[in-house]
């Protein structure tokens, strides 16, 4: 159809995973871990369900999770958060993003977004009547183009959407870059919606710093986390938003009319997870860093030009050194069908003309045996 959403194809993740199943390939496309997630977290969720917590929980989320989110903000970022008025639970970061956009902008408002970007952002902005203003980061350094970013802000700018650590660039924004971004938001009086689902997945000692912690940002930022990434349970779809009461209020209204609530047992399990000790969070990043290194080494040995990954569980590789002639979509279909390995094309994370066409994104949150199989299959093919 020609409605805003009717024109969109199935997401690249659904497309490539379907193709992967069809060809029984090793799926390093869509991002989901082989690891089942911490056993205690899953057991807590199972027990809460079995002990009868199966009716509508409070609209904002169960108190235990809202308290855990507030405590987590304090523990990792020094943020003082009132769990009763500043935290809301959603059905995944995806719902949280939708709630924020539907709650905070009006038709005709401009929204600044950084490319490459996660695929749900622009359809939501457009459906909310917003006008996306794109600012493109360039590989392989993915540096913040400060002049272009400043130029994207204007009198009609209502909101900035920021993803750090950033999927698929695997970039972790630095304190200096974030200070620059914060200054623009304050000067132009705009909201910031921060997708920080990979907050605990940063490498080589790089800190994750929420934009919310910068001067003037506490009152204008909605910060989003997700159990899917932090506890390796992507199917749970438990997200959480932290925002000042005046910012959260319209977001809550959107939640009220879209999902209203989120399964209580999964909220309970997530609350337990957020209270896990420091070793858990350090271990998550450490394990994934080792996997990053392992897959990067394997891909380099095959001949790929592999980019740096500072965070998230994705690495992106240039396939031109392999002599492949075709677009990134062609390449990802080709290796799925002919080599039995699936990746996703980087161009799927861009809108409009001029997207790079020679990069494939590989997901490495997999067992070593899965990574071995992928490397082995690609090595035999190329
Ligand atoms: N934002 C980004 C950048 C993501 O990579 C993902 C994971 N697919 C999401 C949001 C969605 O998270 P959730 O599964 O909690 O909806
Ligand atoms: N966030 C995951 C990725 O980037 C997948 C999300 C999805 O399948 N919609 O691969």
Image: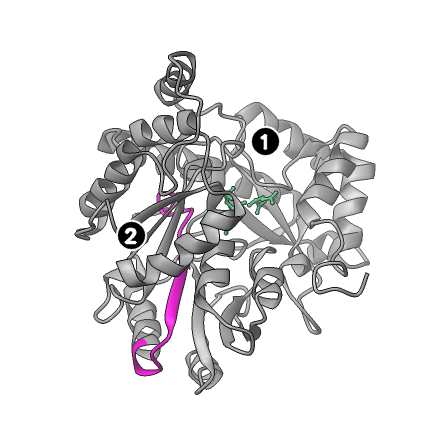
User: Which quarter shows the N terminus?
Assistant: bottom right
Residue 20 figure quarter: top right
- Tell me the residue that label 1 is attached to: 371
> In the drawing, does residue 334 fall left or right of residue 50?
right
Residue drawn 74% across the image and 49% down it = 10
Asked if residue 101 is positioned above or below residue 313 in the image, the reply reads below
Give the image location of residue 311, x and y in percent: 42, 49
Q: Residues within 10 Å of mark 2 (few under 14, many from 20)?
A: some
Q: Residue at x 71, y 63 (%)?
A: 357
Query: Is 357 above or below relative to 182?
Result: above
| Quadrant containing ligand 2 | top right
Disc 2 marks which residue? 207
- The front one of 239 and 195 is 239
SS type, badge 1:
helix
Look at the image and give the residue range highlighted in magenta. 186-203
Confirm whether residue 144 shows in the render: no
Of 266 and 373, the residue lying toward us: 266
| Image position of 363 with respect to 215: above or below | above
Q: Is residue 183 magenta?
A: no
Q: Considering the numbered disc 2 on the image, is that residue within a helix, a strand or a loop?
A: loop
Q: Quadrant of the C terminus?
A: top right
Q: Is mark 2 within 8 Å of ligand 1?
A: no
């Amino acid at each position: 159809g020609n409605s805003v959403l009717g024109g969109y194809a199935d997401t690249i993740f659904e497309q490539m995973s379907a193709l992967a199943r069809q060809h029984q390939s090793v799926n390093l496309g869509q991002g989901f871990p082989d690891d089942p997630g911490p056993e205690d977290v899953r057991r807590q969720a199972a027990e809460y369900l079995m002990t009868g917590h199966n009716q509508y929980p409070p609209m904002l989320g169960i108190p235990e999770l809202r308290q855990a989110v507030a405590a987590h903000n304090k523990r990792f970022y020094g943020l003082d958060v009132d769990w009763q008025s500043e935290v809301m639970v959603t059905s995944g970061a995806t719902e949280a993003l939708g709630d924020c956009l539907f709650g905070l902008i009006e038709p005709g408002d401009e929204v600044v977004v950084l490319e490459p970007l996660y695929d749900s952002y622009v359809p939501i902005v457009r459906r909310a009547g917003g006008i996306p203003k794109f600012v493109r980061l360039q590989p392989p350094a993915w540096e913040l183009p400060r002049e272009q970013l400043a130029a994207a802000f204007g009198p009609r700018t209502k909101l900035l959407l920021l993803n750090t650590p950033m999927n698929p660039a695997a970039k972790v924004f630095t304190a200096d870059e974030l200070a620059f971004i914060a200054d623009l938001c304050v000067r132009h009086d705009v909201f910031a919606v921060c997708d920080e689902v990979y907050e605990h997945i940063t490498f080589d000692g790089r800190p994750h710093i929420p934009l919310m912690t910068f001067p003037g940002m506490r009152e204008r930022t909605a910060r989003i986390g997700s159990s899917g990434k932090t506890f390796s349970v992507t199917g749970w779809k438990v997200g959480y938003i932290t925002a000042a009461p005046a910012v959260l209020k319209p977001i809550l209204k959107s939640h009220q009319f879209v999902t209203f609530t989120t399964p209580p047992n999964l909220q309970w399990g997530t609350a337990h997870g957020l209270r896990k000790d420091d070793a858990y969070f350090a271990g998550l990043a450490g394990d994934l860093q080792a996997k990053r290194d392992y897959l990067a080494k394997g891909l380099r040995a095959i001949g790929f030009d592999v980019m740096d990954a500072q965070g998230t569980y994705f690495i992106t590789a240039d396939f031109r050194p392999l002599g492949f002639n075709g677009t990134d979509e062609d390449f990802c279909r080709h290796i799925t069908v002919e080599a039995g390995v699936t990746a996703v094309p980087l161009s799927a994370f861009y809108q409009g003309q001029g997207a790079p066409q020679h990069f494939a994104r590989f997901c490495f949150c997999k067992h070593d045996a899965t990574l071995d199989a992928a490397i082995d299959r690609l090595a035999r093919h190329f």
